[in-house]
Image (tube, rainbow, N blue to C red):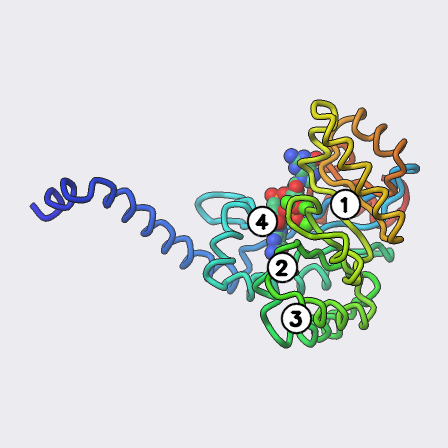
Amino acid sequence: AKAEGRGTARPFAPAMDAALAERRQLEIDLRRAIAQDELVLHYQPQVRSACGRLVGFEALVRWRHPVRGLVPPGAFIPLAEETGLVVPLGEWVLRAACREAAGWACRLKVAVNLSPRQFQQADLPERVLAILTETGLSPDRLEIEVTETVIINDMARALTVLRRLKGFGIRIAMDDFGTGYSSLATLQAFPFDKIKIDRSFVSQLAERPSAAVIVRAVLGLGRSLRIGVVAEGVETDEQMRFLVEEGCEEVQGYLIGKPQPIERLAGALERDLTW
Ligand code: C2E
Ligand code: CA
Ligand code: CA
Ligand code: CA
């Protein structure tokens, strides 16, 4: 009778309850996943566009869920961000990426995504440094990817934290560039080594003339500010040709390689050559 009453008074309540319950369960599961090493990193190659030479790999987290199988980050990072679980999760990712990269038979870089929540920790630089020391990875082999959200949240703090990280010798990349609200002034004020052009622009190169205009503009910006530019989400030969012609130095995308477990990249890591 109670359920019936609720159903008539608040027609959406049962569905909302179900969604909430699922979220709670996901949160419980995710907590366990972090503690019990159910997370795993896949690595996507980044190469020089002109010659195909490997530059490094971006580490991308996946969840090996006991029931649901391999879960992509889009299904749990947003919740992790909301609940704050992204802090221990992000630290797990950083530690795992540094440990694995320290064991590679080459000096390729590893790029790790840091979430806005992680930047709210005052001692983030010390935490990162402690992980580098613990794993033995040389700081110049670590690249940290941050989105515009990190900067917009609290500019002064972001600048202090990024400068300290940079001071350790870590490289800093601006991720998903073009999707947020960063201005030219922001780019200039922050110590970025690299700008990553968001996939949405690259994927629309053939269909939308404005996408080509934006990609060219970002490449021009990179040249003027002497910041390296990487194009993300390169999937076709046509996109690749355009990017090479326009002088985009580095590329990342399914055309070059999908994110893969480290075991599958062992050969490339030993050769440290062309992808
Ligand atoms: P992102 O940092 O922009 O990472 C690039 C995403 O684009 C990855 O998705 C990658 O697999 C995908 N991608 C790369 N090349 C192509 C392509 O050619 N075509 C298409 N369609 N997709 C491509 P993924 O691994 O599902 O990750 C999604 C997002 O989840 C990431 O976007 C990042 O924001 C977040 N994420 C992943 N791992 C972590 C992590 O360890 N920490 C944090 N905070 N966020 C993470
Ligand atoms: Ca990224
Ligand atoms: Ca990105
Ligand atoms: Ca993205």
Mark 3 / mark 1, whichever is N-terminal:
3
Q: Total label count?
A: 4
The amino acid pointed to by label 3 is Arg
Quadrant where ligand 4 appears: top right
Residue holding disc 1: 265
Mark before the other along the chain sequence, 2 or 3: 2
The amino acid type, in three-letter code, at marker 1 is Leu
In the picture, the quarter occupied by the N terminus is: top left
**Measured Cα–Cα span from mark 4 to mark 3:** 30 Å
What residue is at 38 percent from the left and 52 percent from the top? 23
Q: Residues within 10 Å of mark 2 (few under 14, many from 20)?
A: some
Pick the quarter of the image with the C terminus: top right
Q: Nearer the viewer, residue 71 or 186?
A: 186
Q: Is residue 53 above or below residue 206?
A: below
Give me the disc on residue 157: 3
Pointer 2: what residue? 152
Helix, strand or loop at mark 3: helix
List the residue tagged with mark 4: 62
Q: Is residue 7 visible?
A: yes
Q: Nearer the viewer, mark 2 or mark 4?
A: 2
Judge left or right: residue 87 versus residue 169. left
4 or 3: mark nearer the eye: 3
The type of residue carrying mark 4 is: Arg
Q: Residue at x 63, y 59 (%)?
A: 152
Q: Assess mark 1: CB under 8 A from ligand 1?
A: no
